[in-house]
Amino acid sequence: MLSIDNLHFSYEPGKPVLKDISLSLLSEEKLCILGQSGSGKSTLLKLIYAELQHDSGQIVFNKEEIKGRNHQLLPGHEDMTYVAQDFDLATYHTVAENVGSRISNTNQDYKTSRVNEVLKSLSIYDLKDKKPTELSGGQKQRVAIARAVAKPPKLLLLDEPFSQLDSGLHRRLREELFSFLEKNKIAVVFSSHRAEDALGYSDKIILLKNGEVIQQGSASQVYFSPQTTYVAHMFGLVNILNAQEAGAMGIERNFLKDVVLIYPEEISISEKGKHSGVVKRNRFMGNHYEIQFISKGKLLKAYHTQPIPPKERFNFDIRNYRWTLLDEDN
Ligand SMILES: Nc1ncnc2c1ncn2[C@@H]1O[C@H](COP(=O)(O)OP(=O)(O)OP(=O)(O)O)[C@@H](O)[C@H]1O
């Protein structure tokens, strides 16, 4: 349904912001553009929506080329909706009016029931008679998303859809929104700087750094085979061992790669483990403890169900690891 080939874009001549971007998306698929602030996520979404004009490359949506802002009177496409970071709600209209604004008035009963269904699905039914000025940032964000899906598009573009929400509400809305999109068969391209959004909620991830795709694939491909330490660090805590430290752990050298990467959950603490370590400190993380320990002179981190007293010696096994390339930024 969407394919992008060799896309290049710059806001100012000679200062490329997106370089050689290629990706594809099938109907009903979910794609996450993952990257740190300034990596080019919003710019890529704006190009797909033809809010900007790409310098070269091709964007095809539903077999139609999106030629860019200079080639169409208004941005967008009838089968695509876009929720920007500024929401752009109509201030003098109620939440229900905003959400219904893209649904035709020809069948009022349908319109009312569809608006109510969407408001309930996104837990904002109670806000239906309020005006946007009476809402918090997170509530406005949900109203903007509700408006974008009330008349179901084939493709929804979401720029950092959970940025305004605290973590509890973020998890709840994320679950509600993605269930709604799946039920309504709506494909989505969304941007996030948070890897946990990408992991559980996308079929594909593209990882942007300084305007370039540094890796793309399914969530598990990217998680388990990160091409660089930068990619791995996007997913949180990792242990990185240089060749010498890896050798001391009995891990065979891979001469094409720089370092060994081990996720904390890949270290299992057990009496019969073939390595040993001494506990430096424990961190309580709610449903587990992060055990920081020294083994062969290297500080490592593992997860465990219980704390282990500092200075205590224990045994562990490394269940999985992979060699990868060192990225100087991480
Ligand atoms: N209107 C503009 N004019 C010039 N440069 C811009 C403009 N908008 C963004 N940029 C630059 O383009 C680069 C990519 O910005 P973009 O907003 O796409 O990144 P992002 O990954 O979405 O960041 P964030 O997560 O902070 O929104 C940044 O270096 C930014 O400073």
Image (tube, helix red, strand yellow):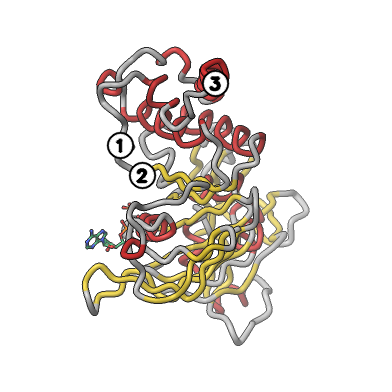
Q: Quadrant of ligand 1?
A: bottom left
Which residue is denoted by mark 3 in the rendering? 107
Residue placed most toward the observer, 115 or 168: 115
What x and y, as percent, mark residue 177? 55, 34
Q: At x 38% / y 32%, what residue is drawn? A: 141
For the residue marked with disc 3, what is the amino acid? Asn
Q: Is residue 323 visible?
A: yes
Residue 63, compared with residue 105, is above or below; it is below
Which residue is denoted by mark 2 in the rendering? 84
Residue 144, compared with residue 10, is above or below; it is above
Circles 2 and 1, Cβ within 8 Å, touching? The answer is yes
Q: Horizontal placement of 318 versus 256: left or right?
A: right
Q: Which-is-in-front pick, marks 3 and 2?
A: 3
Which residue is denoted by mark 1 in the rendering? 88
Q: Is mark 2 within 8 Å of ligand 1?
A: no
Residue 295, compared with residue 57, is above or below; it is above
For the residue marked with disc 2, what is the amino acid? Ala
Q: At x 46% / y 44%, what residue is drawn? A: 81
What x and y, as percent, mark residue 154? 58, 46
Residue neighbourhood size for the residue with mark 2, other residues' Cα within 10 Å, grouped as few (<14), some (14–19), many (≥20): some
Q: Horizontal placement of 36 versus 105: left or right?
A: left
